[in-house]
Image: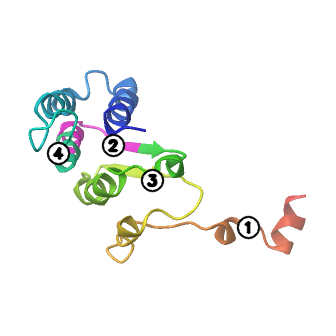
Amino acid sequence: MSLPLFMEYLVASVARVRPGFGRQTLDCHARAFRSGKTGVEGEFDIAALAEAFVYDLERQAEHLVLVIDDLHLIYDSDWIVSFFHRLPLLLPAKTHMLILGQGLPPEPIWRLRPKQRLFVITEQMLAFTQTEAEGLF
């Protein structure tokens, strides 16, 4: 998936619960696509897009939980590490992000664990013990 498409989906998903959300992000997105970070059309300043998205989030008065499911489908995208390495560090205190994926995220994102910006829930943590399974059934 391309970064422009991902950003459109991400902004639209927040706008569904927060009408009018995303003007700063979309403006930054449009400027980046027209000129490109390095002057080449189609290249993006990933950090600027993450910052614009966070700026829009900061303008929201209410708490928000962002849920991004199936992120593993785009782990091989060239922009994913830069975007997700930057975004969690900038999120406002009233915004939380839950990322779901099969498998561990790429290495640089994994480094957010020691900074307590990433908490990984493994299959083993979710598995029922024998006693829990018997109690359930």
Residue 44 figure quarter: top left
Label at residue 63: 2
- Check the image and name the residue furthest to the front: 40
Q: Position of residue 27 (x, y in %)?
A: 15, 27
Secondary structure at numbered mark 3: loop
Label at residue 76: 3
Q: Which residue is mark 4?
A: 45
| Residue situated in front as seen by the camera: 94 or 97 | 97
Amino acid at pointer 3? Asp
Q: Earlier in the sequence, mark 3 or mark 1?
A: 3
Q: Is residue 55 magenta?
A: yes
Q: Which residues are magenta?
A: 53-65
Measure the alpha-carbon separation of dots 3 and 2. Answer: 31 Å
Query: Which callout, 3 or 1, points to the residue nearer the camera?
Result: 3
Q: Earlier in the sequence, mark 4 or mark 1?
A: 4
Label at residue 127: 1
Q: Earlier in the sequence, mark 2 or mark 1?
A: 2
Amino acid at pointer 1? Ala
Label at residue 114: none
* Residue occupying image coordinates x 56% and y 66%: 121
Q: Is residue 75 left or right of residue 90?
A: right
Determine whether 134 is above or below 71 in the image.
below
* Residue occupying image coordinates x 18% and y 46%: 51
Secondary structure at numbered mark 1: loop
| Residue situated in front as seen by the camera: 86 or 76 | 76
Q: Is residue 36 left or right of residue 50?
A: left
* Residue occupying image coordinates x 19% and y 50%: 47
| Circles 4 and 3 in contact, beta carbons < 8 Å | no
* Residue occupying image coordinates x 36% and y 31%: 5
Secondary structure at numbered mark 4: loop
Amino acid at pointer 2? His
